[in-house]
Amino acid sequence: MPTFHRVAAPERVAALVRWFWIPEWRIAPGRSSRQHLISFPACNLVVEPHAVGFAGPTTRASHRDLTGTGWAVGALLRPAAVPAFTDDPTALRDSYRSMPLPTLHAVVSGAMTGPGNQQARHRHAVEAFTDLLCETVPAPSPEALLANAMAEIIDTDPAVLTAGDVAGHLHVSVRTLQRLARRYVGLSPVAMIRRRRLQEAADRLRAEPSGSLAEVAAELGYTDHAHLANEFRAALGLTLSGYRREVHRPDLEHGT
């Protein structure tokens, strides 16, 4: 089975990275492991065995079929880090672009394939990743930190349901909020809120395979079960019940 570890970002890079994530897998010959992905409304910088990639913000669910042996070390970027890698994250929606970052690739790959147990290798990889980001990404501007605050409110406050709610928390206009989201995330504030709510719904469906869908909708602030179901299907191309059946199928290996 693939393993997936989430590592808190060291304090010195906390303004640039929300957390690091490290999957590793060793799949038997002739088998594959389908990993279902409903990503956070954010960009990721990912080191893999043969390349470094930049994953733009996503607007839909996706999956990846893993085979053989492999690993990745990804950084879930905070908005303040995004301009260091692209001037227009909106152009990278639902895309994955190779990045010419050979030094980052070398130090992280060296840590992941070097000596030590899994915990030590992960620690060294995160430290190397952190060192490179601190050395190459400029200190965040006040505007970039405001973008971070915008994302933090959207990601952590379930009472936030509209762009106006977020703008009120930050004491800025909705137009300013929209500009921040476009430059630093690549999604609109409304799309970020919708993705956070759908991610919460998906988490609940994975964690509670026999739970009531109506209760999930009510607890997440939807007017009714149908509203959640329609939004889930429109945004992710999946029904609630279909997604829950798929992630709990006994004949497949799944991840998030």
Image (cartoon, rainbow, N blue to C red):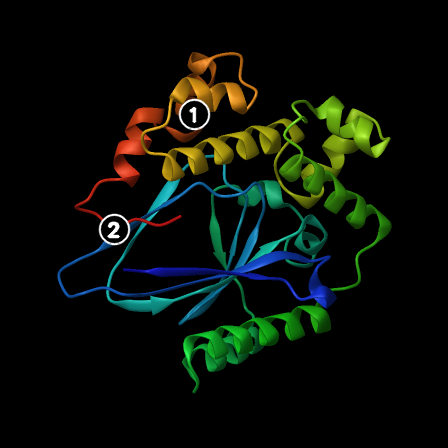
Helix, strand or loop for disc 1? helix
Percent from the top left, x then y, of residue 28? Answer: 17, 65
* Relative depth, front residue between 193 and 138: 193
Disc 2 marks a residue whose amino acid type is Glu
**Which residue lies under the disc numbered 2?**
253
* Relative depth, front residue between 166 and 191: 166
Q: Residues within 10 Å of mark 1 (few under 14, many from 20)?
A: many
Percent from the top left, x then y, of residue 214? Answer: 42, 17
* Relative depth, front residue between 198 and 175: 198
Q: Earlier in the sequence, mark 1 or mark 2?
A: 1
Q: Is residue 153 visible?
A: yes
Above-or-below relation of 25 to 214: below
Q: Residue furthest bottom?
A: 115
Above-or-below relation of 243 to 47: above
Residue that appears at 81% across and 26% down:
168
- Left or right of 126? Residue 2 is left
Q: For residue 157, which numbered disc appears in the image?
A: none
Disc 1 marks a residue whose amino acid type is Phe
**Which residue lies under the disc numbered 1?**
232
Residue that appears at 79% across and 49% down:
145
Q: Quadrant of residue 77?
A: bottom right
Q: Marks 1 and 2, Cα distance to the nearest angstrom?
A: 23 Å
- Left or right of 206? Residue 162 is right
Residue that appears at 73% across and 67% down:
12
Residue that appears at 38% across and 41% down:
62
Q: Residues within 10 Å of mark 2 (few under 14, many from 20)?
A: some
Percent from the top left, x then y, of residue 17? Answer: 64, 58
- Left or right of 133? Residue 124 is left
Q: Quadrant of residue 61?
A: top left
Helix, strand or loop for disc 2? loop
